[in-house]
Amino acid sequence: MTFLEYAPAPESTSILDLKSEYGLFINGEFVPGNGESFTTISPATEQKITTISCASEADVDTAVAAARRAYEKTWSKLSGTDRGKYLFRIARLVQERSRELAVAETLDNGKPIKESRDVDVPLVAAWFFYYAGWADKLDHAGLGPNPRSLGVAAQVIPWNFPLLMLAWKIAPALAAGNTVVLKPAETTSLTAMLFAEILQQADLPAGVVNIVTGAGATGSALVNHPDVNKVAFTGSTAVGRSIARSTAGTGKKLTLELGGKGANIVFDDAPIDQAIEGIVNGIFFNQGQVCCAGSRLLVQESVHDEVVERLKERLSTLRVGDPLDKNTDIGAINSASQLGRMRELSDIGEQEGATRWSPASNLPQQGFWFPPTIFTNVSTSHRIARDEIFGPVLSVLTFRTPTEAIAKANNTPYGLSAGIWSDKGSRVLAVADKLRAGVVWANTFNKFDPASPFGGYKESGYGREGGRHGLGAYLAPAAGPKSSVVSAIMNKTPLGGSK
Amino acid sequence: METTATGSTAIAPASRALEVIGGDLTEKSLRRYLEGIAGVDAVGLEARAAALGTRSIKTTSKAWALDKIISLIDLTTLEGSDTPGKVRSLVAKALVPDAGDLSTPRVAAVCVYGDMVPYAVEALGRAHDADAPGRINVAAVATAFPSGRASRSVKLSDTADAVAAGADEIDMVIDRGAFLSGRYGLVFDEIVAVKEACRRPDGSYAHLKVILETGELNTYDNIRRASWLSILAGGDFIKTSTGKVAPAATLPVTLSMLEVVRDWHRLTGEKIGVKPAGGIRTSKDAIKYLVTVAETVGEEWLEPDLFRFGASSLLNDLLLQRQKLTSGSYSGPAYVTID
C-alpha cells in the first residue's frame, strides 16, 4: 500500500436518526400522502434509505390551502423583524445540525461528504442568515417603499443540490413575506424531510412552509394550481419551457433557472496552476451535475497542449469512490437515468470523432458511477459541445483571439455561466463585458455567495436568485397608482429641503 | 561580471541555466526568462492548499505518515545562545528521538550554525559515517544567516568553513534586497559562487539548500520567480524560510514551490528538493505538508534527499502522537525529552 492510497476515513452514518417512512409536510405536520409511496436509495450502493410519500393532486390542494391560510392569517401580518427572527432561528438550527444534514445529503444524493460538509450545508445556513437580514429592510429592495409580498409561492427544485436549492427558494420567499409549497426532486427528498423537522424545532407557524414529495405529476399539479401566485423552478430547460407555457396568462410571477453549457476560457497568460484547479472545479465539482458547470473548456491554441497535459495529470489524482469517505473527490451519479444520459452523449462524442480520455480508476460494482472524462479534438458542431451532459464530462475546444473566444463562448442556446482565466485585468473585464451569461467568474469558478444574484440568459431561464435581485422575485411594488410611490418618495423631506 | 557584445551584463555560467535559457546567458536573458513564467493567482493557490489540508489521514496512513515525517526532519537549533552542550543534546535526540520506543526512526539531519558543526560531527560519531545505517547529516546555515547582509567574501568563507568542518549540507540565504530591487543577476551569481564554495577537496559538493525567506519576498509571484532563479543557479533544495522572519513556512508557499519543482522535473527530468522551515509545530500540520507533496509532485519526493522539514518542537508532538497510536491514550509533555 502506498501513502496516496489513504486509509479509509468514512464519515459515520450513526448520527442519522431516520424514520422508516416520511409523510408529506403540510400545515406543520407530517401526514401520509394519497399517492403511491416510493423508496429513496443511495446512488452509491443502490441500497434503500427510507420510504417517501407521494402527494396526489388532492394533497397538493390541501398544501396550497394550508399555505394560503397561513399567508392570510399569520405570515403576512407579522412584522419583518419577526419574520427575520424565524429565519435566523432556522439558520442557526441548520448550523447546529450541519453534520447530520451533510451525511444525509451525501447518502441520498451521492455527492462527496467533503462537498456537502464544506459547501452545501454552510451555504444553506448562509442563505438563511442573509435573507433573515433582509426581512425588515424590504423598503430597500429596489421596488420603492412598502413593497408587497406575492402570496403563495410554488417551488420545484432539482436533485443536484437538494438542500441548497431548497434554501435558495425558501429563504427569500419567507423574508419577503410569502408562504411556500415546495416540491423536492423525487430522488432526493431526504434532506427536505430533515429540514421540515428543523421548521418544527424552530416553531415556524403552521402552513408557512409545506413540503410535498413526489414525481413530475406532483410538481405539475403544484405549479398549475390556480391559487398560487408565484412559481419558481430550477431544473431542465424542457420542463421549464412547459411551465412557462402553462403559467402564461395566469398572472403567476415566474422564475426559471434552467440548463447551461458554460464556457471556461483560458488565455495564454493565465495563472496556469490555478486555471487547472479552476477547470477541475468547474466541471468535476458535484460530478459535473451543476447547471452552471464549465463544461466547455475554451483554451487558447498556443497553450492547448500544455493545459491538456497538466489537466490529465491532475485528473489522475482525483479520488472516485465512496461518497461518505472524507477523502473522496468524486462521488456517485445521482440516478441510473442520469448515468444513461452521460453514457449516451459520451458515446456520441466518440462517434462524432472527438478523442475521449479518462484516468485509470476502479469504479465500484454497485451504484451509479461515471469516471471523470475529457474530450479533446471537439468541434463547435459536436453534440458534446452543444448539449448539456450534466455529468463529469469536459469538452475541450480552442480559440486564437479574444474575439473568437467570445464568439465561441456565446455560440450556445444557453447563457448561465462563464469563466475567464487571465493575469491581465483589463482583458478579463473587456471579455466579461461581452459574454452573454448570467454569471461570469474571473480566475475562479463555481463560487456562490448569497449576496450575489444568479440566473441565466436565453434558454438558461429568467429571473435572478440571490442578493437583492433574488428578493425582488418574491415582491411587487406597493399597491396603487405609480404616483403614490412617487409622492411617498417626495414626502420624505430631503436634508435642507423646503419646509 | 563582464559586458558582452550585446551590451548586457554576463552572469556566471551555471550549467542548468545554460541548458534551459541558452548559451547567451546574461542578466537580460535571465530577467526575460524569469518574467516569462506564468503568474500565480493568490486566491486560487490558497484555496488549493486549504483543500489539500482537509485530507483525512487515519489509522495505518497516519502511522506511516508520523514515522515518515520524523525521518524527514532537520532537527534544528539556531540560537545566539547555542553551546557545544546544547548541540550534543540535540544530536542525542536526533539519534534516539524516543528512548521509550527504539523503533522510532532517526531524523534526517541536525541543523546548526557553522561554528557548531565540529561539535555536531563529533557528537554524531559513527552515525555520521558515509555508509552508516540510519546516517544523520549535519546541515549548517551559512552566508551571514539569517539576514545575508555581509560582503560576498564573508559569505563564501562562512560557507567554506562549514564545509571544511564536516557539514554535509549548507543552508544559504539569498540576497533579498538584491532580488526585490530587480538585480536578479547578482542573486544568481551569489548562489553560483556559494555552490562553488560547497566544493570539497575531493571534488564532491556539500548539498546546497537555498533559503528564499518567503516572508520577505511577500508575493507568490516573487516566490515562484525566486524558486526558478535558485534552481537555475544550481540549488539542490529550495527552502522557504530562516525561521527568524514571520510568516515562515506556510502551506500555500510550500505548494507554490512544489509546483516549480514539479515543472522543473517535467522540463529537465531532474529532481529538486523542497524544505519548508519555521512554524510547523504539530503533527496535524506536518501531515498536511506530506499530503501536499504526494499530491503535487508525487510520493517519490517523500525521501530525505527531496523533502525536509526544518523544525525543532515538531518532533515532540510527533512522538506524542506516535505514543498515542501505540498505547491508545495520550500521554503528555513529561513523557518526551525537551531535546
Image (spheres, rainbow, N blue to C red):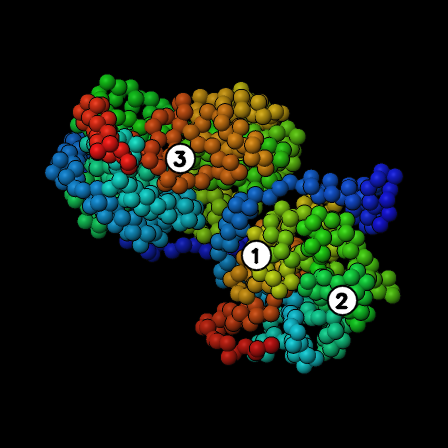
Tag nearer the camera, 2 or 3:
2
Where disc 1 sits, the SS reads loop
Task: Determine the residue positioned at 69% across, 49% down.
Answer: B181
Question: For this rendering, which residue is in front, A282 or A470?
Answer: A470
Question: For this rendering, which residue is in front, B105 or A7?
Answer: B105
Precedes in sequence: disc 2 or disc 1: 2
Does the rendering let one see residue B134? Answer: no
What's the CA distance linking mark 2 and mark 3? 61 Å
Judge left or right: residue A171 versus residue B125.
left
Where disc 3 sits, the SS reads helix
- As shown in the figure, which amino acid type bears the numbered disc 2? Asp
Judge left or right: residue B42 versus residue B209.
left
Question: For this rendering, which residue is in front, B175 or A261?
Answer: B175
What's the CA distance linking mark 2 and mark 1? 26 Å
Q: Kindly identify which chain the residue marked by label 2 belongs to.
A: B
Task: Determine the residue positioned at 13% across, 35% down.
Answer: A72
Q: Residue A435, position in %: x, y?
A: 49, 26
Q: Are marks 2 and 3 in contact (CB under 8 Å)?
A: no
Say which residue label 1 marks.
B250
- As shown in the figure, which amino acid type bears the numbered disc 1? Thr
Tag nearer the camera, 2 or 1:
1
Relative to A36, is B14 above or below?
below
Judge left or right: residue B160 versus residue B323.
right
Say which residue label 3 marks.
A336
Say which residue label 2 marks.
B168
- As shown in the figure, which amino acid type bears the numbered disc 3? Ala
Q: Residue A275, position in %: x, y?
A: 56, 39
Give the mark count: 3
Are discs 2 and 1 both within one chain? yes
Are discs 2 and 3 both within one chain? no
Q: Residue A308, position in %: x, y?
A: 61, 35
What's the CA distance linking mark 1 and mark 3? 44 Å
